[in-house]
Amino acid sequence: MGLETTPEVIAATVDAVGVSEQQAREAAAAVAAPTLILHGEKDAISSVDVSRDLASITGGDLIVLPQTGHEPQCRHPRTVNRILGAFLAGAWDAPSHLTWSGARGEPPGSRRG
């Protein structure tokens, strides 16, 4: 996926048929597995508040990647892969340049379901 998105693509995404916010919240609340949410601090398409809400609903962990826009996995794949690898391995030692907030005040990846 490219790093740039045209206004036409964004408009088509906003107008797309999808689930309601209530349906999305109910689905998120049903997640029982450890959850990690990654969000770019400079994301101009989706507010970090949405990811904060998702972390709160799921009891998951949120990582906000500084100076990063939408789709951090495309912009910084090595960083994202390291974060995912540590989360999946259950060994989390957060790099000091990343900010995080666990819904339960725990470091990301420390909770096991």
Image (cartoon, rainbow, N blue to C red):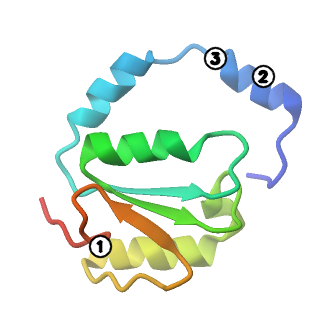
Q: In the rendered view, does 56 fall on the left or right side of 73?
A: left
Whichever of labels 1 and 3 marks the residue nearer the N terminus, that label is 3
Which secondary structure lies at badge 2?
A: helix
- In this view, 75 is above or below 13: below
Which secondary structure lies at badge 3?
A: loop
Give yes or no for contact between labels 2 and 3 (Cβ–Cβ under 8 Å): no
Give yes or no for contact between labels 1 and 2 (Cβ–Cβ under 8 Å): no
Whichever of labels 1 and 2 marks the residue nearer the N terminus, that label is 2
What amino acid is at disc 3?
Ala
Q: Residues within 10 Å of mark 3 (few under 14, many from 20)?
A: few
Which marked residue is nearer to the observer: mark 1 or mark 3? 1
Residue 89's spot in the image, x, y percent? 28, 78
Residue 30's spot in the image, x, y percent? 20, 34
Q: Residues within 10 Å of mark 2 (few under 14, many from 20)?
A: few
What amino acid is at disc 1?
Pro
Q: In the rendered view, does 35 fall on the left or right side of 9?
A: left
